[in-house]
Amino acid sequence: MGFTPPLSVWLRNKKNRKSIYNHIFNPDGLVLKLFNERALGHILLQHINGQIDHTARLWRILFLNEWYMQKVLQREKCQNN
């Protein structure tokens, strides 16, 4: 079936917290335009503290922002130049 990466562990790891936070709360990203910032912080905190496993939700949020930054914003940047 393949390798299943330990996403839950990666998302809880102290070494990754700053990067994850910066990706989710990037002011140029799409996530803050779609979702409540306080709710996002609550989800992230619950996951980090081990209260609720939000791995799937956080992974989708991270990649939604990454997709937006790489595809949409880059296209707009190229069109404006």
Image (tube, rainbow, N blue to C red):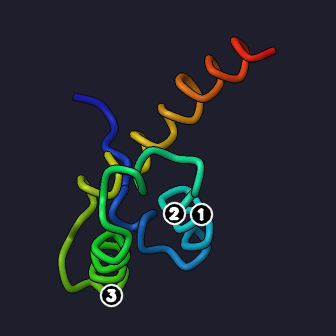
How many badges with numbers are in the image? Answer: 3
Q: Are marks 1 and 3 in contact (CB under 8 Å)?
A: no
Relative to 12, residue 24 above or below:
above
Residue occupying image coordinates x 65% and y 24%: 74
Which image quadrant for residue 63?
Answer: top left
Which image quadrant for residue 55?
Answer: bottom left
Residue occupying image coordinates x 20% and y 85%: 51
Q: Which residue is mark 1?
A: 22
Q: Are marks 3 and 2 in contact (CB under 8 Å)?
A: no
Instruction: Tell me if mark 3 has few (under 14), some (14-19) or many (20+) residues whose alpha carbon lies within 10 angstroms of its own.
Output: few
Residue 47: horizontal and vertical position, in percent?
30, 76
Residue 62: horizontal and vertical position, in percent?
43, 49
Instruction: Tell me if mark 2 has few (under 14), some (14-19) or many (20+) residues whose alpha carbon lies within 10 angstroms of its own.
Output: some
Q: Earlier in the sequence, mark 1 or mark 3?
A: 1
Measured in 3D between alpha carbons, the distance from the residue under mark 2 to the one under mark 1, in whole angstroms, is 5 Å
* Residue at the extreme left: 52
Q: Which residue is mark 2?
A: 25
Secondary structure of the residue carrying numbered label 2: loop
Relative to 15, residue 31 above or below:
above
Three-letter amino acid code of the residue under disc 1: Asn
Three-letter amino acid code of the residue under disc 2: Phe
Residue 23: horizontal and vertical position, in percent?
55, 56
Q: Which residue is mark 3?
A: 49
Instruction: Tell me if mark 1 has few (under 14), some (14-19) or many (20+) residues whose alpha carbon lies within 10 angstroms of its own.
Output: few
Residue occupying image coordinates x 38% and y 70%: 37
Residue occupying image coordinates x 39% and y 40%: 64
